[in-house]
């Protein structure tokens, strides 16, 4: 019964480009027609349960069949497979690669709601799940200079990952409108790339906070290596504890961390930021965001990638921040920048496939590349982008025109 249903599903889902499937019983089906710019992919299912698993939850079912080696890609790769499905069903035109079944959807919503509590203990555990898997993996995937695990910025003429990450750091620094000697808080500082850049180029003191022990240790070492250890302090600390300490900062920057806060904690996060930010301070929040309204996190991402995480809609973010008299002075939507960034990470992982498999195993490599393929294509064809929101507590804290954002 599952095979005819999958056949009907794929006949609707793939119109341009070609998808061929060799089923476990030896039968073959093809979908779509060749079209320029659309991939051509051939799959093999090694058992009869794969169609059912995909129909129950298209993303999780396909992902786990791929991870377990039950869905084999005979021609093409996982990036091409996910690109084929998403490009045929773009969010902009009302497309969806297929929601989970009703039962799976109810289970996912209930599990998602429970995970969104994200208290102190849960937050540290969730961060460790993703960031404490070892710095060696990220060394193979990220840019060597800045170690930025977040959306880069691709102005015209920039062609390398390192160049785009440098451009992102400069872009954010302009929005912070820095002056020498200021105290800056970097919430979710990662491996210290932002803190090092600001300390080195703007003569400010940066306190970076993270919940990842692996990140904190390497960030401190990188600050020493860069000669700015006297200007960069890295703490293993939760933002809620920073707020409770009573410390205040001239500037706050947070890049790629808000996605981990959890919807139930949005107001807590912005209340903490309002407490921490000086009266004439400036804050820059850089986060993945939904183009549409609020939603839920899919089962694959919750299980394998970011447990406890949630991608906010712009409406949710602004609604939470405005309760604490934080004035949104500038909002920029980065539409395709993250897709370009993640495709670079994917290429790096494919280049270093043997090293990553040696660090972990084949199943991990398949899981990780499926995650990257899904992430890249959701920014190309799905309902995700990046938002940079600039906040102040005092309307006079910044120039009244945006000319200061233009520069080197």
Image (spheres, helix red, strand yellow):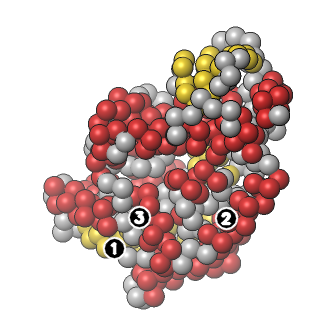
Say whether disc 3 or disc 1 marks the residue closer to the N-terminus.
3
Say whether disc 2 or disc 1 marks the residue closer to the N-terminus.
2
Q: Where does the N terminus fall, quadrant-wise?
A: top right
Marks 3 and 1, how far apart at CA = 12 Å
The residue that mark 3 highlights is 128
Label 2 element class: helix
Name the residue at the front extreme. Answer: 25
Marks 2 and 3, how far apart at CA = 19 Å
| Residue occupying the point 47% across, 38% down | 366
User: What crowding class fits label 2: few (fewer than 14 Cα within 10 Å), some (14-19), or many (20 or more)?
Assistant: many
Instruction: Answer above or below: position of 392 versus 407.
Output: below
Residue 395 bears which disc, if any? none
Foreground residue, 222 or 135?
135
Is the C-beta separation of discs 2 and 3 under 8 Å?
A: no
Camera-near label (2 vs 1) is 2
Q: Quadrant of residue 362?
A: top left
Foreground residue, 182 or 96?
96
How many numbered tags mark residues here?
Answer: 3
| Residue occupying the point 56% across, 56% down | 303
User: What crowding class fits label 1: few (fewer than 14 Cα within 10 Å), some (14-19), or many (20 or more)?
Assistant: some
Label 3 element class: helix
Q: Position of residue 312 (x, y in %)?
A: 65, 60
The residue that mark 2 highlights is 112
The residue that mark 1 highlights is 236
Say whether disc 2 or disc 3 marks the residue closer to the N-terminus.
2
Q: Quadrant of residue 57?
A: top right
Is the C-beta separation of discs 2 and 1 under 8 Å?
A: no
């Amino acid at each position: 019964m599952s095979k005819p249903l999958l056949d009907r599903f794929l006949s609707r889902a793939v119109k341009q480009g070609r998808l061929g499937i060799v089923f476990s019983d030896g039968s073959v089906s093809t979908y779509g027609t060749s079209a320029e710019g659309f991939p051509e992919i051939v799959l093999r299912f090694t058992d009869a349960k794969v169609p059912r698993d995909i129909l129950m939850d298209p993303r999780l079912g396909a992902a786990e069949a791929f991870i377990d080696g039950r869905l084999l890609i005979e021609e093409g790769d996982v990036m091409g497979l996910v690109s084929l499905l998403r490009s045929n069903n773009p969010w902009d035109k009302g497309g969806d690669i297929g929601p989970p079944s009703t039962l799976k959807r109810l289970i996912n919503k209930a599990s998602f709601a429970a995970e969104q509590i994200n208290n102190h203990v849960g937050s540290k555990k969730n961060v460790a799940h993703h960031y404490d898997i070892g710095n060696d993996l990220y060394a193979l995937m990220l840019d060597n200079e800045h170690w930025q695990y977040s959306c880069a910025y691709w102005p015209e003429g920039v062609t390398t990952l390192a160049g785009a990450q440098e451009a992102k750091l400069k872009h954010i620094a302009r929005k912070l409108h820095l002056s020498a000697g200021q105290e800056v808080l970097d919430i979710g500082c990662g491996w210290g790339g932002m803190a090092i850049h600001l300390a080195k180029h703007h003569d400010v003191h940066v306190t970076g906070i993270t919940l990842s022990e692996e990140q904190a240790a390497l960030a401190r070492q990188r600050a020493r290596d860069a000669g700015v250890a006297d200007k960069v302090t890295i703490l293993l600390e939760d933002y809620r504890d920073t707020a409770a300490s009573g410390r205040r900062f001239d500037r706050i920057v947070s890049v790629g961390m808000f996605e981990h806060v959890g919807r139930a904690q949005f107001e807590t996060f912005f209340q903490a930021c309002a407490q921490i930010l000086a009266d004439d301070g400036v804050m820059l929040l850089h986060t993945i965001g939904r183009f549409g309204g609020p939603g839920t996190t899919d089962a694959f991402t919750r299980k394998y990638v970011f447990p406890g995480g949630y991608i906010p809609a712009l409406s949710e973010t602004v609604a939470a921040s405005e309760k604490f008299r934080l004035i949104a002075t500038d909002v920029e939507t980065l539409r395709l920048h993250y897709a370009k960034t993640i495709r670079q990470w994917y290429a790096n992982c494919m280049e270093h496939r043997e090293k990553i498999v040696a660090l972990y195993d084949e199943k991990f490599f398949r899981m990780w590349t499926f995650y990257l393929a899904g992430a890249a294509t959701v920014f190309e064809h799905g309902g995700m982008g990046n938002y940079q929101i600039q906040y102040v507590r005092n309307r006079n804290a910044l120039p009244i025109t945006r000319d200061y954002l233009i520069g080197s």
